[in-house]
Image: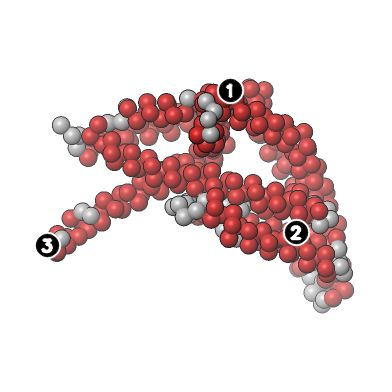
Amino acid sequence: MTLSVREQAKYWGLAAAVFFLLLWGLGTVMLPFLVGGAIAYFLDPIADRLERMGLSRTAATATISIIALLIFALLALLIVPMLVRQLVQLVNAAPTIVGQLQQFLTERFPQVMDNESVVRDTLGAIGKTIQARGGELASTLLSSAMSVINAVVFIVVVPVVAFYLLLDWDPMIARIDQLLPRDHQPTIRAIGRDIDKVLAGFVRGQVSVCVILGTFYSVALMLAGLQFGLIVGAIAGLVTFIPYVGALIGGALAIGLALFQFWGDWLQIGIIAGIFAIGQFLEGNIITPRLVGKSVGLHPVWLLFALSAFGTVFGFVGMLVAVPVAAALGVLARFATGQYQSSRLYKGQTGLDES
């Protein structure tokens, strides 16, 4: 006998409550396993492709793990220290940059920058605040992250969890499929495929877009001679998941720094602006269509809300699960909307007579 809608809602609601309770109570303990699971999910298509090329699952997993460890070592030894150094230098240079802007505005628009001008006071306050709070913010983020994460355990556990989950991914999914309620198995499978499609489009696709564009911006800006090119490119790539915002923020920051560094050399400033124009062309016409495609994605506003809400309630762990939970809720909302539009409540007696 099929369970009523009320009974189904009770059981699924209880399962959701247990999940969020565990997330709230065991967030720190679950963090390495969530990160390892996310890495395994991200790398599973690569392992499947290597299997189709003739490798066993074990060999494919081992190959991916070795390459991933080499990339991680390269990032830890070279890229991350450069990012931190440029971030500190940018924070310390903020008062000088603001001072140069004040001098420029004073020479060009003296009536705006007199001694009693609000603009003058505001710019001075901004420069001092960035220098005073920027370093404090960076150190606070690092210290809080280290207080949440036991670094040694994290570094050891995450690769091990990712390795074993990647190795056993297909049998694990098959086992979960066997445990689905028989009466609702087709519906749950369809919803699961839709959730996977959204996550594949966003997590695998959009994260790849962010990494590719961040790398392109960073390398191109450094080759163009911009003093803080690496950190500006990293910022632009990080927020690329919000359409146009990454290019606007990164472009404004890069052009502003280029005006400070290359004032008078309009060719050099034009090159910096051209880098972001090329990046936008590549993103819209080549990178995003190939990696993300036409899959149903996550609306940026919904994604930002989920990140903010889960981050506030569950901390750093909540931010990690915000994307898959937001994807699942979005798919469930579309499913519920479809059910409503095919119901008598929506169609009424007239709609039923016409059908």
Circle 2 residue? 254
Report if the CB atoms under discs 1 and 3 are less than 8 Å apart. Answer: no
Amino acid beneath label 2: Ala
Tell me if residue 352 can be seen. yes
Earlier in the chain: of badge 1 and badge 2, it is: 1
Q: Nearer the viewer, residue 240 or 128?
A: 240
Which residue is found at the position 37% from the left and 34% from the top? Answer: 16
Q: Secondary structure at mark 2?
A: helix
For label 3, the crowd category at 10 Å Cα-Cα, with few meaning under 14, some 14 to 19 and many 20 or more, is: few
For label 1, the crowd category at 10 Å Cα-Cα, with few meaning under 14, some 14 to 19 and many 20 or more, is: some
Earlier in the chain: of badge 2 and badge 3, it is: 2
Q: Nearer the viewer, residue 342 or 162?
A: 162
Which residue is found at the position 60% from the left and 25% from the top? Answer: 62
Which residue is found at the position 58% from the left and 46% from the top? Answer: 207
Amino acid beneath label 3: Asp
Horizontal side, residue 88 vs residue 58: left or right: right
Specify the quadrant that holds the C terminus.
bottom left
Residue 160: give its label: 1
Horizontal side, residue 336 vs residue 212: left or right: left
